[in-house]
Amino acid sequence: MGWSKQQFIEQAFAEIGLAGYVFDLSPEQLQTALRQLDSMVASWNALGIRLGYPLPGSPQYSDIAAETNVPDSSNEAIYLNLASRIGAGFGKQISPETKQFARMAYNTLLSLAGVPPEMQLPGTLPSGAGNKPWRTTDDPFLNHPIDPIYSGPDGIIGVS
């Protein structure tokens, strides 16, 4: 069970020194942070960092209580980078340690997402002596390359 969007937001506010048990966060502040969270994860999604975060179709359809189901390894990267994004808007200076940990956690996400695509051989390359024609087809050449962009079962476009 993953963290909810509200838990990420509250943890980011706690990181910049505006914890909910000391300061009451207004609904406008929570909505501002929610939009920042959604846009941050959407930009990561565009870079190929797919976390399984439920991105809304429009900002007004985002639910702050929604479960995110992101892997536990990405929680720290999400709330630390969110704290770095929302801190200036609330008049808070982000500590160098928070910036450093946010950068390290983001680099960890990049390394986990950075899987190089498989090399595809051209369809004009002979299949070789080990590939007997009765095993697959009578074609003496390798299969033609496939288009590397596909849509997975959840409708998210992935790059192979």
Image (tube, grey):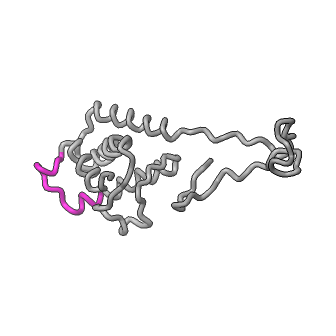
Within the image, what quadrant is residue 28 found in? bottom left
User: Can residue 27 be found in the magenta stretch?
Assistant: yes
Q: Camera-side residue: 84 or 54?
A: 54
User: Can residue 123 be found in the magenta stretch?
Assistant: no
Point out residue 143 in the picture as x, y percentages from the top left corner.
79, 48
Q: Who's the residue at 49% across and 35% down the image?
A: 111
Point out residue 119 in the picture as x, y percentages from the top left corner.
70, 39
Residue 67 higher or lower than 57, as above or below: above
Residue 117 in the figure: left or right of residue 137: left
Q: Residue furthest left?
A: 22
Point out residue 73 in the picture as x, y percentages from the top left corner.
37, 41
Within the image, what quadrant is residue 57 found in? bottom left
Residue 14 higher or lower than 111, as above or below: below
Residue 45 higher or lower than 95, as above or below: below
In this figure, what is the number of numbered marks?
A: 0
Q: State the extent of the magenta-drawn residues as a range.
A: 18-33
Q: Who's the residue at 32% across and 57% down the image?
A: 34
Q: Residue furthest bottom?
A: 61
Q: Who's the residue at 18% across and 42% down the image?
A: 17
Residue 24 in the figure: left or right of residue 123: left
Q: Camera-side residue: 51 or 9?
A: 51
Point out residue 94 in the picture as x, y percentages from the top left corner.
27, 38
Q: Who's the residue at 38% across and 36% down the image?
A: 105
